[in-house]
Image: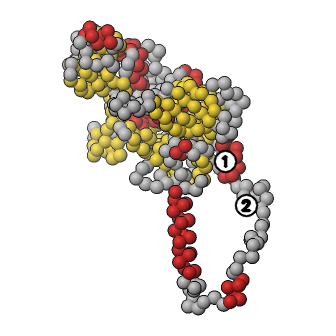
Amino acid sequence: MPSRTAIVTSAVGGFFLGVLFSAGTWPGTDSTPSSAMAASQQPTGDLLPSHDAPVDSAERNTPVVQVAARAAPAVVSITTEVPNQSPFRMFYNLPDTTSSQGSGCIIRSDGVVLTNAHVVDGAMRITATLSDGTSYEATVLGLDEQLDLAVLRLEGANDLPSIPLGTSSDLLLGEPVIVIGNPFGLGHTVTTGVISSASRTLEVADRVYQDYIQTDAGINPGNSGGPLLNIHGQLIGVTSAIRKDAENIGFAIPVDRAAKVARDLLRYGSVQAPWLGVSVKDIGGPRYRGTAIAEGAVAVSSVLEPGSQGPFLHSGDIILKVNGKPVHSRDDLNLRMATSQPGDEIRLEGLREGELFKVDVTALAAAPDMGRQLLQSSLGVTVTPIDARTARSYGLRTKSGLLVATSKPTGTFAMAGLRAGDVILAVNGTAVKTEEDLRTSLLKARTSHRDSVLLTVQRGPYRGHVDVDL
């Protein structure tokens, strides 16, 4: 069925032609057509001659057509069911669940699918449909909200077509790209465009995403999680967002980052975040310790694992580049580290007391019990999940979060003015419901080179945010 725009355009065009010819004149002339010419325009019952072009002709079977034919069977349309959170659900007899749609791409023949985290986060049920109409129930194997990526498995699937991985390290400005997805439920829609930018900063809600691919290929709601392909049919990005106040400005997560996340989620169930064994802070402005930092950088605020990097990093060092790419903030530093694995060699460039230095260091792995140590030794607290019984016993006004059962006076939690009986609702904006959630959030903060976390805390009827040192 033609789109609404096509229908409007066709109607306008037909009306214009009808008015023009009913006047009895030809465009650009003042005379009426001759009777011979008029007769020649009368319908004879014959259509225009047919000149069929072979399907395999080079003019029709372009590289884009070939990519679409190969890749479409490996693209899935995703439908999810999520709980209906409307406060008016019972009053208006609304359904218990609502549905949303997205896209995904099969990256392994046994039914492993890569998509966006926001496509499947919170879903009670996930259904993936192939181009031939075959549907599978899907389960989430791993999900990372911060990087907006998720890995699914199609239940009972095997020997499925898959999309080969390319690389996003050598993208060319203006090179052609193809998008296949499920916009507005229109499954397996193909659009084309070019790379508009290979490294774009994207702000979404309260988060900043670095080094996204920008393209003018058509991306609409429902395309999220689908593939961005190069002209060889290789996956170079995962389509994720659009700019609502503009046309033809869409964004995709680079495949090098997405592939690393997918491997980690499949192998470990979580993203393995390598770090430098230090905490850093954003700096900038005209001068920092006598050094001009025009565009911003990060400075080492403390060395958290002395000796782990030998004599290479010291408090006060300014990091300007990681593996040759500029670093203007802590987010930049974490992004540059995101495609590395623990044990990889990392080239740092920076300033120490105004002098340039270059050094190779090792990306570190977090200690297995780091989250527990941070909770017990740094914050100095023990926590318990809140259920109905706990809420009644302590007279709590909330049934979510974690109740702080004990708090050491020497812990950073108590030193921040907090105490036992307070309820921790979130860490750095991420809700926590179990002690494992809290440990994981503390671990992520540490390996993101932070020396503190922002806790959302409730005390009685009051709720607020408190910065607590790690």
Figure label count: 2
Q: Is residue 17 left or right of residue 449?
A: right
The kind of residue tagged 2 is Glu
What secondary structure is marked by label 2?
Answer: loop
Residue 146 rendering spot, x and y as whole percentages: 44, 32
Above or below, 193 against 251 in this view is: below
Kindly identify which residue carries mark 2.
59
Label of residue 464 in the image? none
Q: Residue at x 44, y 31 (%)?
A: 95
Q: Residue at x 20, y 22 (%)?
A: 461
Q: Could you classify mark 2 by the number of other residues whose Cα lies within 10 Å: few (under 14), some (14-19), or many (20 or more)?
A: few
Q: Residue at x 54, y 60 (%)?
A: 7
Of residues 426 and 341, the one drawn nearer to the viewer in this rendering: 426
What secondary structure is marked by label 1?
Answer: helix
Of residues 36 and 107, the one drawn nearer to the viewer in this rendering: 36
Query: Of callouts 1 and 2, which one flags the residue occurring earlier in the amino acid sequence?
Result: 2
Above or below, 469 against 191 in this view is: above
Residue 140 rendering spot, x and y as whole percentages: 54, 26
Residue 357 rendering spot, x and y as whole percentages: 42, 36
Q: Is residue 251 left or right of residue 297?
A: right
Q: Based on the displayed image, in which of its 4 quarters is residue 378 positioned?
A: top left
Q: Based on the displayed image, in which of its 4 quarters is residue 412 positioned?
A: top left
Of residues 286 and 264, the one drawn nearer to the viewer in this rendering: 264
Of residues 363 and 88, the one drawn nearer to the viewer in this rendering: 88
- Whole-angstrom CA distance, mark 1 to mark 2, is 16 Å
The kind of residue tagged 1 is Ala
In which quadrant is the C terminus drawn?
top left
Q: Is residue 190 left or right of residue 92?
A: right
Label of residue 68 in the image? 1
Q: Residue at x 39, y 41 (%)?
A: 204
Q: Could you classify mark 1 by the number of other residues whose Cα lies within 10 Å: few (under 14), some (14-19), or many (20 or more)?
A: many
Q: Is residue 166 left or right of residue 461?
A: right
